[in-house]
Image (cartoon, rainbow, N blue to C red):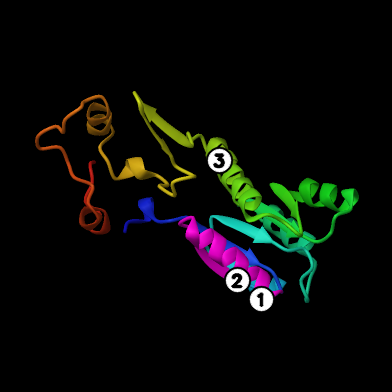
């Protein structure tokens, strides 16, 4: 699989193993790849290694406050989406996290469907800020690049052929295929 079509990577940061397990199950069922951290130090190390597309962050970590992680990430110039997941329900705390740069805030206990919707929204907003459209449309065909996990799918498909295929009821002869093998080997349209 090429980097252009790789699944989105979510860093789950929580000091409670059952919460991390629950989040991992929900996110992987939706096609996300997850990494985990249970301390602030582990979180910052994972972020320094790169390859993370979004962070789900608990504020109550054993070695540092999650607010300090948000501040550090934003001061470093990163626009990485951060969805806070915390038992802190006071309005002032929520406002502070959002003002420091969190993209959203979900209080525990939470519903997994709501959290997944907020993750998708944060990813859509980030795509829009980068000048990309989160939903590609051509005729009756639309591909949601966030919901389907098909990030940058168009990098692997020749856009003009894709558009022609979308408007025809039968396949175009000699159209490039987008099999797993061709994506894995990096074959695509230039």
Q: Residue 25 at x, y = what percent?
A: 54, 65
Mark 1 falls on what kind of element? Answer: helix
Residue at (64% x, 52% y) in the render: 115
Q: Range of the magenta residues? A: 16-35
Whole-angstrom CA distance, mark 1 to mark 2, is 6 Å
**Residue position for label 3:** 124
Q: Work out whether mark 3 precedes mark 2 in sequence or the reverse, and give the earlier one.
A: 2
In the image, residue 21 sits, relative to residue 3, either above or below, namely: below
Total numbered circles: 3
Q: Is residue 10 magenta?
A: no
Marks 2 and 3: in contact by CB < 8 Å?
A: no
Marks 2 and 1: in contact by CB < 8 Å?
A: yes
Position of the C terminus, as image quadrant, is top left
Whole-angstrom CA distance, mark 1 to mark 3, is 28 Å
**Residue position for label 1:** 17
Looking at the image, residue 39 sits to the left or right of residue 49; the answer is: right
Q: Work out whether mark 1 precedes mark 3 in sequence or the reverse, and give the earlier one.
A: 1
Foreground of the two, 29 or 180: 29
In terms of secondary structure, what is the magenta stretch mainly?
A: helix
Looking at the image, residue 176 sits to the left or right of residue 127; the answer is: left
Residue at (34% x, 40% y) in the render: 154
Within 10 Å of disc 1 (Cα), the crowding (few <14, some 14-19, many 20+) is: few
Q: Residue 15 at x, y = what percent?
A: 71, 74
**Residue position for label 2:** 21
Mark 3 falls on what kind of element? Answer: helix
Foreground of the two, 87 or 70: 87
């Amino acid at each position: 699989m090429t980097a252009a079509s790789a699944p989105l990577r979510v860093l789950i940061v929580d000091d409670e193993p059952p919460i991390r397990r629950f989040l991992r199950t929900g996110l992987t069922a939706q096609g996300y790849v997850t990494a985990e951290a249970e301390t602030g130090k582990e979180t910052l190390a994972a972020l320094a290694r790169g390859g993370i597309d979004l962070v789900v962050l608990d504020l109550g970590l054993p070695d540092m406050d999650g607010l300090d992680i948000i501040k550090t990430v934003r001061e470093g110039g990163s626009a990485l989406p951060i969805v806070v997941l915390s038992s802190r329900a006071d309005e002032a705390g929520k406002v502070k996290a959002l003002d420091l740069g969190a993209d959203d805030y979900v209080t525990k206990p939470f519903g997994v469907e709501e959290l997944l919707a907020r993750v998708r929204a944060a990813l859509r907003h980030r795509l829009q800020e980068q000048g990309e459209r989160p939903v590609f449309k051509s005729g009756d065909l639309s591909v949601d690049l966030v919901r389907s996990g098909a990030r940058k799918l168009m990098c692997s498909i020749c856009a003009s052929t894709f558009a022609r295929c979308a408007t025809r009821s039968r396949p175009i002869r000699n159209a490039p295929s987008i099999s797993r093998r061709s994506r894995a080997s990096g074959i695509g349209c230039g």
